[in-house]
Structures are given as C-alpha cells and as structure tokens.
C-alpha cells in the first residue's frame, strides 16, 4: 500500500493504462468523441493499437483476435456501436477465448454528437455484461475487471463510459493486480459448434448465453463492483441508486443519502437492489439519459422513485440532481448561449461550400468538420444524419425529385467518413443510378480533422503516423465504373472546380469530384510525417 | 493567503477555442495535485478548436466528488476573452451571508506591455489566481514545466511571475 503510482488522468487515459497493465494484445476501433484518446494513449504507451476503417470492422478484428487467444480492446463512441451492432449480437453467442472488451463512450448532452442515445440498452439487447465506471480510478479498475470477467465467462464485456468520465481528470493510483495472463500464447483452437453460427449451432449457443448471464447475475449480488456507500444522515432515510457519473453528482447533491452504487449495470443485482430499497424510507434512482435502471427495477416489482422526464435530456450535474431529488419538474433556464464553433479561416472546406451556395445546390451532407458548412456564412447543407448518409440520402432525393430539382442535389462527404461508410454508397450509386445521375464531392483534407487529426486508410499512415497501405479514392471510384472522376485543390483551383461542378450538375451522369487540400491545422504535421517517411526510404527530396 | 474557507476550491476557466483554456486548467489541476490535494477537472472538448466557446472546471480540496463546478459555486472565474465574461458570469458564487462572492479575473488584470508574449496571458492569469490559492509556488512552476514544451518554459514562468506579482482585489 502507498507505493502505487498516483497520477492525474482522464478516464480515457486510465482505460489505456489498464489495457497495457491487463495485457491487451490488440487495441482497435474508430475515432469518435469522447473515446478517441483511449487508443491514442494506448499506442503512445507502447500498446499495439490501430484505427479500423469503421467500428464494425474494428469489432470483428477484435473478435478474431479474441478467438485466437489474444486479448482485445475495441473502442468507439456511442453511435459507433450502432455500426458494430451486427457482430456484437452474435459475438455474444460465440463467446471468446481471450478477453474482448468493447468500449462504448456515450455523449449525454451531445457535446459533440448527432444524438444522445443511451447505449446501456445495448447490454440488455445483446445480452452482454456491462460495467460503468464513475471516475478515472474506476475506469482503470473496471477495465481490468472487464478483462477478468470476459475470460471467466468467455464472452465479450461492454465498458460503458460517458463524456464526463472519458474527459474529466481525476486522481488514479495504479494499483489492483493485473489479471493473470490468458491461457497460453495465442493459438488456433477449432470450435465449429461454438463459432460457426448456423442455426443448429446458434440455438444451443443462445441457451448457453442465457445460462452465463444467470450466473453473472448471481455473482453480481455480492461482487465488489456494486456497493453501498453510507451517507451522513440517519440510516434508513434517503437511499439513492445510481451508476457512472450520476453517482458522484448524487453523493455531492445529497451527502446525507446512502448510495447503492452500481458498477455492474447488466445484469442487474436485483436482490441487492430490492434489499436496499426495503431498507430506506425513500429510494430514488438517479441516472443520466433513459430511465434504464428505473424501468428494470420497477419491472422487477421494486417500488422506486425516478427522475421527472425533463432530466432525460442532457447531462446531469449537482444542481440538476438536487432539483431531481426535490421532485422539481419545472422547466429549467437555458444556459447563456456561447459562441458557436466555425470553420477555421481559410479552411479548404469553406471554398467548396461557397461554390455549393452559389450554385443553389441541395446538399446532402455528412459528419465531420465540414458539417460546420451548415452555419453562416455558408449555410450550404440540407441534411446530416449519420456517417455515410451524405451519399445515400442524396441518391434517395435524386430518385424522387422532379428532374429540375433532382439536378441540384449533390452529396458531400469527408475523406475519413468516405472510408468509414461512403464506399457502399458509391456502389449503390453505380448499381441504382438515378435518372438524372448524381454528383458526389469527397472533401479530402488528408486527416480526420473533427476528432483531432487521426489517420485513416486514405492517408496511407497508421495510427502512430508510420507509413501504411493507402487507398486511392480516384482509383476506387474508377474501378467501380464511374467515368467522371476529377481531383481539384479547392483553394488554388477554385475556378476550375467551379466549372467542373457546373458541368457535372448539367450532365445526367455520375460524377465524383475529389477536393484535395490538407486541413490547415494538420498540414504542418502531415509534411513532417511525409518527410520522416521519405527519410526512412532514403528517397531523394524533390 | 486568503483562500476561501470551505473545503473544496472551485475554479472555472473560460474563453474561446485556441486561447489556452484547456492548457491553463491542466496546469492548475496539476499544480493542485502536486500540492497534495484531491483534484478533479472537467471540460468538454469536441469542436472547441474551431474558435467556439470553451470552459473547463477545476476543483480541489481534501475530497472532491463531482468533477463539475455546481452552478453558482465558482470561487474564481478566470475568463480569457472579454466577450465570454457575460455568458459565464452565472458560474460565480453570489455573495452570501458572512461569505464574499466569487472573484472574476480577466486579462485586464495584466499590463499587456509587461507580458513577455501575448499568448502567455492564460498563464499570467494563473499567476494572478495563484495569490489566492493554497498551492506552493514550486508546484506551480513544476506544473508549468510539465505541461508545456521546453521552448515555452521561460516565457511562461515569466508570465506566471508577472501575474503573481500583480495585486488583485
Ligand atoms: C458511427 C460514427 N463513428 C464516429 C463518429 C465521430 N465522427 C464524426 S465525423 C468523423 C470523421 C470526420 O472526418 P472526415 O470525414 O475526414 O472530415 P473532417 O473532419 O476531416 O472534415 C468522426 C470520427 C460518428 N459521428 N459516427
Ligand atoms: S480543423 Fe481543419 S478541417 Fe477543421 S475547420 Fe479547421 S482547417 Fe478546416
């Protein structure tokens, strides 16, 4: 005791430290606020970390590693789990040999997201155990616990974080024994019944999954992840049931209350909850987002109070929890408006949006820095739903609009987003070509700017910026059979880009225009990486 | 040292993306940590680098629970951009019975002519704040060194000293 190293860490950094201590053999995932720094830190600490083109690919690669006996960590933001949901649900059936920890970083309040979905619902839907830390110390400890749980029951485990857990810094002491090494070095173990999910194998697999969950539920009744923290008030008074960040808000808002702090939030320790509620005069569930705990607890026949509907929206904080506990459902004052973000002055995206505005385009947009094209002065975006939808929503509009309007529709997508989920959109465009054709603009700024300049397969550099295989968007588009593929520098060749756009909008053809110029904030670093790669290969400088 | 006489010290640092709000809060949190306090720091970074409003909360003391400063409980509000004072004023603790209200610290506290580099105004304001906080001077200096690249050490230590020598109400 006392000898453990103490550090001030963000939740993301703490998960990365635990991944290293816990012997994670492969970290993969796709960037997304607030999860991005986990893999970046893991890599900086010396772990093997890589960006996948999207979350589904990341999860499948992680699953393969875990089948083969290597511990895997897969990270993503909440909406990323929608993309990865397909492998997630069936990975629950197959199970794993070595640990598979899936991080879902939710964003209540939408600091940087398009929705505030509550991914605790995925744990129940996919039938996977879920852990929810409240601070960086627990982010560290629960990551280690997730590795252990995953190997004890041989199934993937969800580690559900939220923005305030990911990005707050709190003191961590790096103690806790790391889990024992997995059984042997990675090796292939044939298990057709366990891993080939044809119906004949999946039916018993589903029964096995439910049996494991029942065991975990029994374990959860006494496991150290769930505990009661006594308050300063009289013993049988106010009881609060909470998990994650809501726990610390609640303890500060109501120091007199006893708090049943749930770290394992699926499956729930219903016996423990029932006994806690019975022991308190008043029991209130304090949770951020959906009434996930409250509904499950009530469905089990335990009477608890829960938050009025207004608290479902946005983040909780100490003030809101005080009001929630007082049953205050009066409308809350909106915080004073701050200054909205903008495209950087001179951003290459800005030149493109100016042209789209001038041409009166109907712009099916997508997600990234360039979504800021919706704000003044450009106001040149008409839709933005989820990654990849820029191309496909544009196609849908082209199919049904009268021709004159259909010809004004263009799709706009960033380079990282294109790799993530735009390629199938191009396939759709070639296969189901709208009568008026279509125009897709790929805004290639050489980085994933939105989330802090991560590499992707189009940059030709790996997560640690070392050279890697590179996907050429123009070759890909041509290979799909798209005849008009043009590349312009939007800043230097604005006139030529303008003329190409005029032609493309008039033609009833398929056009892909790639606007290529580095993000202003990334340009310097990109030059450095290129120089370093050049030096490596001893290529003469041109 | 006239630090507030309740257990946890609450500081909100606000400004616009690119002004060094997060750097300042990192240095403050680290300095408090080095002085042996429990510390929590919260912030929302997402689109902040694109010049939008940004704020970061630092809380320290014997034991900190929520990482976010509760509304109206900031002992100190440090604002790096004049137009961000009004949107953030609500964080400050109002004057209560027997207790002064929270203090607002803005770049006006610093003589721009004496500042070694305009970009270091965030650290200069930490110097002003430091007069009021139970954090050792060496912890501040170590935190500045640990959170900035070496070539910026001299300028920022100088800016900090300038702020620390500046009387503030
Ligand atoms: C499924 C999903 N994963 C991750 C994100 C987070 N995210 C939004 S856009 C984006 C990529 C932006 O990069 P790019 O398309 O290159 O545009 P840029 O920001 O560089 O302009 C990411 C990672 C998300 N919104 N949805
Ligand atoms: S960070 Fe890069 S892509 Fe984003 S607005 Fe600035 S210059 Fe444009």
Image (cartoon, coloured by chain):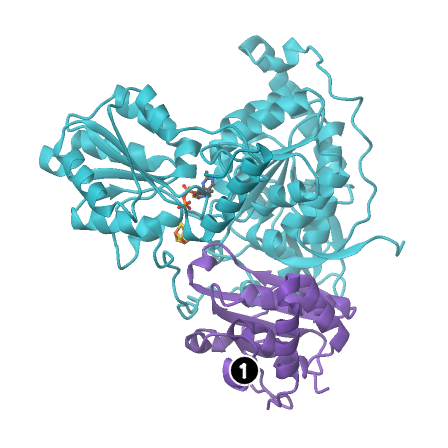
Measuring from the top left, give residue A377's x and y in whole percent.
Answer: 26, 59
Q: Which residue is mark 1?
A: B104
- The residue at the point 57 percent across, 87 percent down is B95
Tag 1, which secondary structure? strand
- Dot 1 surroundings within 10 Å: few (below 14), some, or many (20 or more)? some
Q: Is residue A126 above or below residue A143?
A: above
Q: Quadrant of the rendered structure where residue B74 is?
A: bottom right
Vertical comparison of A521 with A430: above or below: below
Question: Which chain is represented by cyan in the image?
Answer: A
Name the one closer to the observer, B29 or A469: A469
Residue situated in front as seen by the camera: A217 or A139: A139
Chain to which mark 1 belongs: B
The quarter of the picture where the C terminus of chain A appears is top left
Q: Residue at x 32, y 25 (%)?
A: A477
Please state if A72 lies on the left or on the right of A405 as rendered: right
Image coordinates for residue A399, horizontal then vertical, percent: 19, 29
Q: Is residue A263 visible?
A: no
The front one of B142 and A163 is: B142
For the point 60% across and 11% down, the residue is: A201
Res. A214 image quadrant: top right
Q: Which chain is the one coloured purple? A: B
Q: Is residue B139 left or right of residue A119?
A: right
């Amino acid at each position: 005791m006392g000898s453990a190293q103490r550090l001030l860490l963000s939740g993301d950094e703490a998960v990365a430290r635990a991944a290293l201590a816990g012997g994670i053999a492969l970290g993969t995932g796709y960037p997304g606020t607030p999860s991005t720094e986990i893999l970046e830190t893991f890599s900086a600490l010396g772990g093997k970390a890589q960006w996948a083109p999207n979350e589904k690919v990341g999860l499948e690669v992680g699953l393969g590693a875990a089948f083969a006996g290597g511990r895997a960590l897969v990270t993503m933001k909440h909406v990323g789990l929608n993309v990865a949901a397909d492998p997630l649900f069936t990975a629950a059936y197959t199970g794993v040999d070595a640990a598979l920890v899936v991080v879902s970083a939710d964003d209540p309040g939408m600091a940087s997201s398009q929705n505030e979905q509550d991914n605790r619902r995925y744990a129940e839907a996919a039938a996977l155990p879920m852990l929810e830390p409240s601070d960086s110390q627990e982010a560290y400890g629960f990551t280690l616990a997730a590795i252990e749980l995953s190997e004890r029951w041989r199934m993937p485990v969800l580690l559900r974080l939220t923005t305030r857990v990911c990005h707050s810094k709190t003191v961590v002491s790096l103690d806790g024994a790391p889990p024992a090494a997995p059984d042997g070095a990675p090796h292939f173990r044939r298990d057709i019944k366990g891993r080939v999910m044809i119906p004949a194998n999946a039916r018993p697999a589903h029964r096995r999954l439910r049996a494991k969950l029942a065991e975990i539920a029994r374990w959860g009744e006494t496991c150290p992840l769930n505990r009661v923290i006594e308050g300063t008030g009289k013993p049988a008074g106010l009881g609060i049931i909470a998990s994650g960040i809501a726990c610390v808000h609640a303890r500060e808002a109501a120091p007199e209350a006893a708090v049943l702090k749930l770290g394992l939030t699926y499956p729930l320790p219903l016996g423990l909850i029932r006994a806690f509620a019975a022991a308190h005069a008043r029991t209130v569930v304090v949770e951020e987002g959906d009434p996930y705990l409250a509904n499950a607890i009530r469905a089990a026949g335990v009477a608890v109070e829960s938050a009025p509907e207004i608290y479902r929206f946005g983040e909780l904080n100490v003030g809101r929890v005080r009001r929630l506990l007082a049953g205050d459902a009066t409308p809350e004052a909106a915080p004073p408006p701050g200054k909205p973000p903008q495209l950087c002055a001179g951003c290459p995206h800005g030149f493109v949006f100016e042209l789209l505005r001038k041409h009166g385009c109907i712009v099916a947009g997508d997600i990234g820095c360039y979504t800021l094209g919706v704000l003044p002065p450009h106001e040149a975006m008409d839709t933005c739903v989820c990654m990849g939808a820029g191309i496909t929503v544009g196609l849908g509009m082209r199919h049904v609009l009268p021709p004159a309007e259909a010809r004004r529709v263009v799709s706009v997508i960033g380079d990282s987003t294109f790799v993530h989920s735009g390629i199938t959109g191009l396939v759709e465009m070639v296969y189901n070509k709208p009568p008026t054709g279509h125009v897709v603009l790929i805004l290639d700024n050489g980085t994933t700017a939105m989330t802090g300049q991560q590499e992707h397969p189009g940059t030709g550099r790996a997560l640690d910026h070392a050279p890697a295989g590179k996907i050429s968007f123009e070759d890909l588009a041509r290979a799909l059979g798209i005849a008009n593929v043009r590349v312009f520098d939007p800043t230097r060749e604005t006139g030529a880009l303008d003329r190409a756009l005029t032609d493309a909008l008039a033609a009833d053809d398929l056009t892909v225009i790639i606007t290529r110029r580095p993000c202003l904030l990334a340009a310097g670093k990109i030059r450095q990486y290129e120089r370093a790669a050049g030096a490596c290969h001893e290529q003469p400088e041109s | 040292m006239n630090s507030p006489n309740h257990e946890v010290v609450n500081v909100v640092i606000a400004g616009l993306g690119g002004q060094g709000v997060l750097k300042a809060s990192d240095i403050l949190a680290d300095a408090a940590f080095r002085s042996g306090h429990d510390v929590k720091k919260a912030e929302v970074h997402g689109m902040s680098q694109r010049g939008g409003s940004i704020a970061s909360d630092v809380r320290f003391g014997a034991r900190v629970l929520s990482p976010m400063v509760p509304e109206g409980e900031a002992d100190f509000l440090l604002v790096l951009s004049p137009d961000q004072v009004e949107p953030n004023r609500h964080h400050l603790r109002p004057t209560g019975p027997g207790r002064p209200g929270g203090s607002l610290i803005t770049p006006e506290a610093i003589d721009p002519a004496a500042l070694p580099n305009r970009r270091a105004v965030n650290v200069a304001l930490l110097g002003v704040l430091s007069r009021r906080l139970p954090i050792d001077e060496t912890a501040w200096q170590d935190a500045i060194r640990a959170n900035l690249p070496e070539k910026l050490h001299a300028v920022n230590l100088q800016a900090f000293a300038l702020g620390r020598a500046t009387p503030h109400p």
